[in-house]
Amino acid sequence: MTLYADLHRHLGGALHPRIIYKFLQKNDHPILNYFPDYDGFLNWFTRPCRTLEEFVKIHSLVEELQSLEHLPYFCLRLCRGAYTFENLQYMEIRYNPYFRTDKSLTVAKRIGQMTDIVEVITANLRPAEFPITVKQILCLDRRLPSHINEAILKVAKDNLGPVVGIDLAGPEIDPEKWEIWVKLMQKARSNGLKTTAHLGETAIDNVHSQYLTCLDRIGHGIHIPLVRPEMLKELAKRQITLEVCPTSYRQTGVLKDFHQLKTVFERCRKAGVAIAICTDNPGRNPAPCTLPGEYERLIDHDVIDFADLKSVQTEGFRSAFGYAGPQRQ
Ligand SMILES: [Zn+2]
């Protein structure tokens, strides 16, 4: 059995919609007033959005469900599904701990609760029957004030080991604030954390060259090869991997066609920039979206060749932040 590694998957978008729906039923959640049957919920939850902002709104709903009390329920299902249905050997799951804290608390108390969130996730990402290794990446968010992002970084540092890295997430707003994020990423690195950031997903505006000095990988970054291919040389020099999540671009309205990714792959290959193919938010995609399914879609659309599969699979492990063991076949 071939085993795989997924490096870009959000806790809020990783779960099968059926699992979320069953959870809503179990908890008699008021949102069911809008969705008395599963099909209605499924259509709403997996519909393609016009913009990333619209996409992120539904994501926020799931983040609120994933409270301290309910995280064990979601973590177990996430791990067993990834191992059983996708043959994942290794996964990096990313999430914002602040968005999972109790909204009724003060900001100071919510910041304090982030430690509990990370600890409960750590304790529940090791299901005995499913031998998958899951490491965590904590997400900073462009919409949050500095002191909360600083606190997220501190929690990451305090949990180094189960937490392997820091990501910058949220809608791609305020490109002029790059300096804030570059400083935080530098700080993360000096504390032994690896770094990635959602950049160049919807446009090129956010891709300031200084980010290249402090990132180990870039979440998406597809607009670099599409719009600024001359930057690829620097990415190659610094060995920055792009995390490319094919179906995601259709769901967030970024690309119309998978075929557009052919340019991304060709230019990166030519420049020597590594690509790790990832799933981003597989639970939000209309067809059951798995990592091997993403590989298959790329072959179907002539973006990669069947013969590339081995190197694609190897790249997932090579670019991982916390993978130590040998790759099993
Ligand atoms: Zn993402």
Image: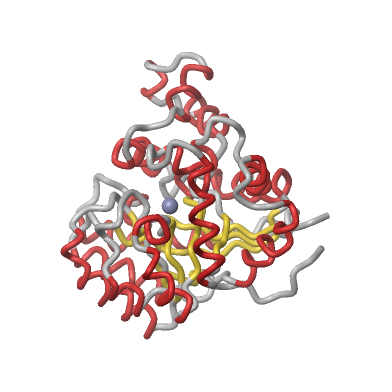
Task: Judge by depth and name the residue closer to the eye, 199 or 107.
Answer: 199
**Residue 158 can be seen in this image:** no
- At horizontal 56% and vertical 54% (from top left) the residue drawn is 278
On screen, residue 36 versus residue 316, left or right, reads left
Q: How is the image coloured?
A: secondary structure
Task: Judge by depth and name the residue closer to the eye, 65 or 81.
Answer: 81
Measured as percent of width and height from the top left, residue 100 is found at 37, 50
Measured as percent of width and height from the top left, residue 155 is found at 37, 70
- At horizontal 32% and vertical 37% (from top left) the residue drawn is 51
Q: Is residue 66 above or below residue 243?
A: above
Going by the picture, which residue comes out furthest to the bottom? 190
Please tell me how many numbered marks the rendered image carries.
0
Please identify the quadrant where the N terminus is shown: bottom right
Q: Is residue 139 above or below residue 163?
A: above
Q: Is residue 49 above or below residue 206?
A: above
- At horizontal 49% and vertical 49% (from top left) the residue drawn is 280
State the image quarter where residue 189 is shown: bottom left
- At horizontal 55% and vertical 63% (from top left) the residue drawn is 275
